[in-house]
Structure formats: C-alpha cells, structure tokens
C-alpha cells in the first residue's frame, strides 16, 4: 500500500456497517430485507442504491446505474473526497485509526450532476394486474392434471398468473413481469392446448400477445407508452426469499413447472433465449443461481454467463441435454416434468 495511506486501517474502515455510514451521509429507508438510499453516482430522485449488510457482505449497489462499491467508495462518491480524505473522515467518525497529518478535511466537493437521458417507461397499475389473477387460465388447467390443485393455486398467487379473454377464448394465460420493486413492467399473454390427448398438450397453441400494447391501443394506458423488456419473470420474488437458491430458465412456463416440482428454489425466467443480458440479470447479484437452459440454448448461455461471473454464482446445468430424447433439440425442463408426471 502507498505509504501515505499506511496509517489508515482500510480493512477495518470497509468493515464499518454500511447502513450506519449511509445514515450519516443522508436518509436511509428499509426495503424488505435490505436498506436503500439515494445513489451518489447518478442524479437519483428515488432511493435506488441498495445497501447490503449481511453475513459476508458489506457493500452497496445501484440497479439503476450499475455502480456501487465499498464503504470507502460510498464516502468518496457522496462527499466528493479523495481516497485519503474518505479514510480520514471514516477514521475520525468512528475512531478506528490515526487521522492524517494535516489535521483537517477539505470541504466536500460539489459533484457535477450529469443527467442521463433515459426512456420514460409506463408501468401497468398493480390494480389492473390483480384483477386478472386467476387459476382458471389454460396453463393452470393443464398443470392441475399433473400437480396438486392446491399447489398450482399457491404458485398462481405467488407469480400473479392471470386469465384473460380474447380471440373468442376466455382462458388465455397472463404472465406478469413484475420487477424487484413491485412494478408491473408488462403482461405476456399466451394460450395453451388443454387437450391431454393432443401431442401439443400444455404447449402454446396461439400467438403471443402483450397486454401493455393492447391496452395502450385501447386507451386504457397512455398512447405510445414504452414498456420495459429487461425484467425477469418472477423477479418480484427475489427480495421475498433472499436466502434461497435461484433457478433460472428461459420461459415463464418452465418457471411454473419448476416451482411446482422443486418449490424449495425461487424460479425465474428471462422470457426468451436472447434476453440473457447483464442488465436483465442484475437482480440476481450475489445470489447462487442454477441455470437450466433449453437444450438448444445450453452452449450459448454457458458462453454468455462466462462474462458474468462477477455478478452471481452461476452454475449452468446440462439437464435438458441429458434427458432429451435422441434427436430432439427443442427440449426444456417443462417437457421433462410433463412426461414424468403424466407417466405416473
């Protein structure tokens, strides 16, 4: 370490509980199992900097701008201090190590506010989503042939699965994309073949629709509204179960099958193969994640996740390759579980 910093015990400074430090720098609010404060790395209007103060963790991260760091980093950015000045400030505030030879601190530097132009997204009112929640949809009708109806009802409530009437059918399945803050980003609508004698049983038999766009055209939402596409299906469950292992799959249907077969894990889905992106996976930060790609996506997802080892502890499974029938490239965990459950 540089000699000018030798009189600072940086290890002890970074071990100071970060929530307490943030409280000395500004207002802190509790959000479930974590705390939040205004992010000093961008022009934050609503607290978006998450403070992690749990076993083995004492740092901060902002899901809006993707920045964060240690206790010292937080002080540096909040007060406009150099590394040395931040160490001195913490040392004096908490009496951990010697102060600097100068005996005084410079006044905090005024940060230049950089306003980043971002799209103004429309979030669908929770009340509109709640009105749709029902297990009378086509997917849940299929699932109740394979799993206990009570378990299907429970997962339907957990994931806020809904039912919607359109195209002459009254049982389209609604998959809401609800972010970790509880905001409804969009509602994906699909219909499933409910005939157990059909080779397409429990598979999507219609086009896919998005209620955000439909309701915007109908005037129920603002005309020309923009909706976020970087939200995981099931993302809202991550803060609710902070200690559970996460299972990441491609489709919401796969997540529902997984949640019914292995409820000890929290199941989330990207929505499609190409949505495996860093910005989409930010809510998984510091979590243990078992990734179960569809058979035709295994190599692509493995390669993509190699560049995200700093984000979470990802373990990519070859499960779908190992269990797929010979020559069947399009095979997912729902196909496996369906075959197993119907053969009982």
Image (tube, helix red, strand yellow):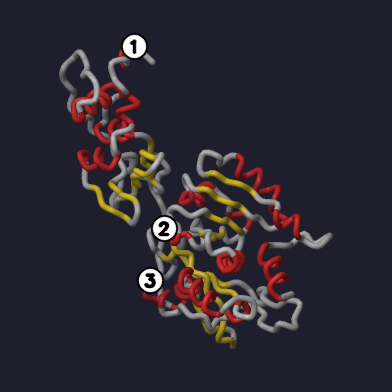
Q: Residues within 10 Å of mark 3 (few under 14, many from 20)?
A: few
Q: Alpha carbon of mark 2 to alpha carbon of mark 1: how far?
A: 44 Å
x and y, in percent, of residue 342 in the image: 71, 76
| Disc on the earlier residue, 2 or 3 | 3
**Numbered circle sitting on residue 180:** 2
Q: Residues within 10 Å of mark 1 (few under 14, many from 20)?
A: few
Return the residue nearer the eye: 38 or 248: 248
Return the residue nearer the eye: 138 or 183: 138
**Numbered disc 3: secondary structure:** helix
x and y, in percent, of residue 246 in the image: 53, 54
In this view, the residue farthest toward the right is 326
Q: Is residue 110 above or below residue 253?
A: above
Q: Residue at x 66, y 66 (%)?
A: 334
Q: Which residue is mark 1?
A: 3
Q: Alpha carbon of mark 2 to alpha carbon of mark 3: how far?
A: 14 Å
- Number of numbered labels in the structure image: 3
| Disc on the earlier residue, 1 or 3 | 1
């Amino acid at each position: 370490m540089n000699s000018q910093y030798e009189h600072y015990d940086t290890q002890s400074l970074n071990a100071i509980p970060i929530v307490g430090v943030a409280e000395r720098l500004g207002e802190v609010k509790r959000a479930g199992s974590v705390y939040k404060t205004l992010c000093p790395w961008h022009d934050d209007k609503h607290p978006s900097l998450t403070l992690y103060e749990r076993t083995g963790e004492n740092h901060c991260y902002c899901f809006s701008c993707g920045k964060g760091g240690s206790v010292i980093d937080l002080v540096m950015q909040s007060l406009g201090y150099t590394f040395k000045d931040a160490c001195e400030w913490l040392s004096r505030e908490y009496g951990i190590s010697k102060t600097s030879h100068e005996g005084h601190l410079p006044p905090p530097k005024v940060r230049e506010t950089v306003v980043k132009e971002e799209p103004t997204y429309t979030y669908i009112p929770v009340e509109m989503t709640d009105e749709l929640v029902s297990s009378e949809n086509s997917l849940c009708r299929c699932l109740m042939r394979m799993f206990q109806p009570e378990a299907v009802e429970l997962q339907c409530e957990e994931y806020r699965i809904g039912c919607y009437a359109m195209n002459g059918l009254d049982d389209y399945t609604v998959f809401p994309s609800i972010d970790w803050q509880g905001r409804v980003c969009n509602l994906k609508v699909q219909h499933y073949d409910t005939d157990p004698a059909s080779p397409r049983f429990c598979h999507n038999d219609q086009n896919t629709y998005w209620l955000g766009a439909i309701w915007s055209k109908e005037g129920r939402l603002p005309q020309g509204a923009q909706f976020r596409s970087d939200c995981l299906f099931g993302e809202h469950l991550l803060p609710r179960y902070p200690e559970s292992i996460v299972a990441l799959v491609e489709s919401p249907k796969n997540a529902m099958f997984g949640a019914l077969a292995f409820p000890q894990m929290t199941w989330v889905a990207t929505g499609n193969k190409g949505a495996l992106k860093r910005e989409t996976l930010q809510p998984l930060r510091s979590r243990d994640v078992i990734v179960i790609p569809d058979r035709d996506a295994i190599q692509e997802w493995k390669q993509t996740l190699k560049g995200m080892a700093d984000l979470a502890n990802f373990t990519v499974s070859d499960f779908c390759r190992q269990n797929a029938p010979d020559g069947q490239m399009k095979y997912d965990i729902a196909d496996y579980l369906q075959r197993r459950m119907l053969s009982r």
